[in-house]
Amino acid sequence: MEWFTAPDYWLTRLVFQRALAALYLVAFLTAALQFRALIGERGMLPVPRFVERVPFKRAPSLFQLRYSDRLFAGCAWAGCAVSAALVAGLDSLLPLWGAMLLWLVPWALYLSIVNVGQTWYSFGWESLLLETGFLAVLLGNDEVAPPIVVLFLLRWLLFRVEFGAGLIKLRGDECWRKLTCLDHHHETQPMPGPLSWFFHRLPRPLHRVEVAANHVTQLVVPFLLFTPQPVATAAAALMIVTQLWLVLSGNFSWLNWVTIVLALSAVRFPVEPPSAAPAPLWYEVVVLAVAALLVLLSYRPARNMISRRQVMNRSFDPLHLVNTYGAFGTVSRVRYEVVIEGTADDVPREDSDWREYEFKGKPGDPRRWPRQFAPYHLRLDWLMWFAALSPAYAGSWFGTLVERLLENDRDTLRLLRRSPFPPDAPPRFVRARLFRYRYTTWSELRETGACWERTYVREYLPPTRLAGVAQRS
């Protein structure tokens, strides 16, 4: 079938697949380096405990069959190896069926991780990576030109990501409709980046322009993805510019980068396509059959997107094949942070030698400037932002985190930037306090060198020891 493929998009496919493989590599590396303290056998939310109560059909995963930290590490590092091989172009050296199977491996491995990752893997970019990765399986390799129907499904995914995010903003916080959300967002976002302070200090009229431009990019431009070239390429380019602006303004894991990769799939590069063999019949049948399934599965996400009760970041099937997306329907006006401290004193007092634990990404010391981590994802730091919003968000894991700090647990301390206690001398007590953080002004920054100013709000967790809660004196 001559209509089945689009030879002009061969370079588009190449760029898309190599970029996606690089994001897979980051995702697997994140899992390999952090899982033991988060979901390992002695993690805050252990996988064995999860699979005991959640059946396979609700959360398909290799780890439903058997779990051990060694097996998880093997899968995560195997995912890194396969992803690196795909970045290097191994799929182009294989027959078509072999390339498809190779692309299926990281999808299956990462699905197994996400489906047992619980709270730590509950973000929309996990499903977005899986949905994008599944479509990459169907794109084929250099043996055939890219299938038109798969390119369409990639644009449909990008449309849902952008348009869904735009709708959730209009239906959510009134500051999006008043164009005032960016007066607060750069200061209160989960994990600011090194330029976030400067973004926050931009003139307020410019913030209004940013929000208005965001509405246009998310509510109008997505429809242009389905128009003829070069309009579709121009629409995708505008989305890429917008996402790069977001990359500069904060740390949002690989959310922005996956969206950029998806936008690249709509770009037609002005190059002469190489000759390619006609697509084999079995390949056409597989692609069309799976595409029909995905279109049918799109009904519920599409209905949710146009519903007045739209929800964000929900999977409608356990394989995360077609999902709904959205971000920051509500913007916080005030930033709170949970500061965790420990002391070696036998009796915890207010004047005890309390030493603060330093996290890698979340704000702590007011003089320490935020760093850029994305697309690498600091899962504990992100969840600490939610913990500051309400203790209910951290009820399932915060107590275990404190227990591991009291033990000087090596894997947990690796998630932090620095522990104030030597490995052989754990703290006797650990406490947590809630602070309000705000960005300093230009004059305060010049005078103190601090980008944050913080004010004590209240006790979050009283001084606690392994045997229980200590009496305060």
Image (cartoon, helix red, strand yellow):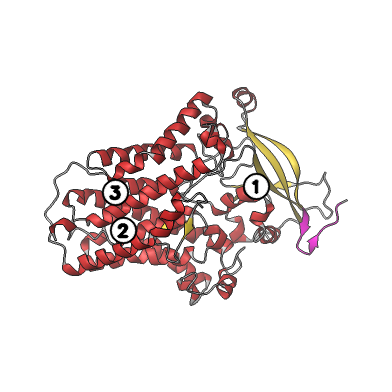
In the image, is 321 to the left or to the right of 382?
left
Disc marking residue 265: 3
Range drawn in magenta:
462-472
N-terminal-most mark, 1 or 2: 2
Q: Is residue 258 visible?
A: no
Q: Position of residue 111 (x, y in %)?
A: 43, 65
Which residue sits furthest bottom?
A: 65
N-terminal-most mark, 3 or 1: 3
Q: Is 471 in the magenta?
A: yes
Q: Which of 369 and 270 lies nearest the eye of the viewer?
A: 270
Q: Is 49 in the magenta?
A: no
In the image, is 351 to the left or to the right of 153?
right
Disc marking residue 136: 2
The residue drawn where x is 31% and y is 39% is 235
Q: Amino acid at mark 1?
A: Leu
The residue that mark 1 highlights is 389
Question: Label 1 to label 2, Cα distance in Å?
Answer: 37 Å
Q: Amino acid at mark 3?
A: Ser
Q: Quadrant of the N terminus?
A: bottom left
Q: Is residue 75 above or below residue 447?
A: below
Question: Label 3 to label 1, Cα distance in Å?
Answer: 37 Å
Dot 2 crowding, Cα within 10 Å, few <14, some 14–19, many 20+: many
Q: Which of 224 and 114 lies nearest the eye of the viewer?
A: 224
Which residue sits furthest right?
A: 473
Dot 3 crowding, Cα within 10 Å, few <14, some 14–19, many 20+: many
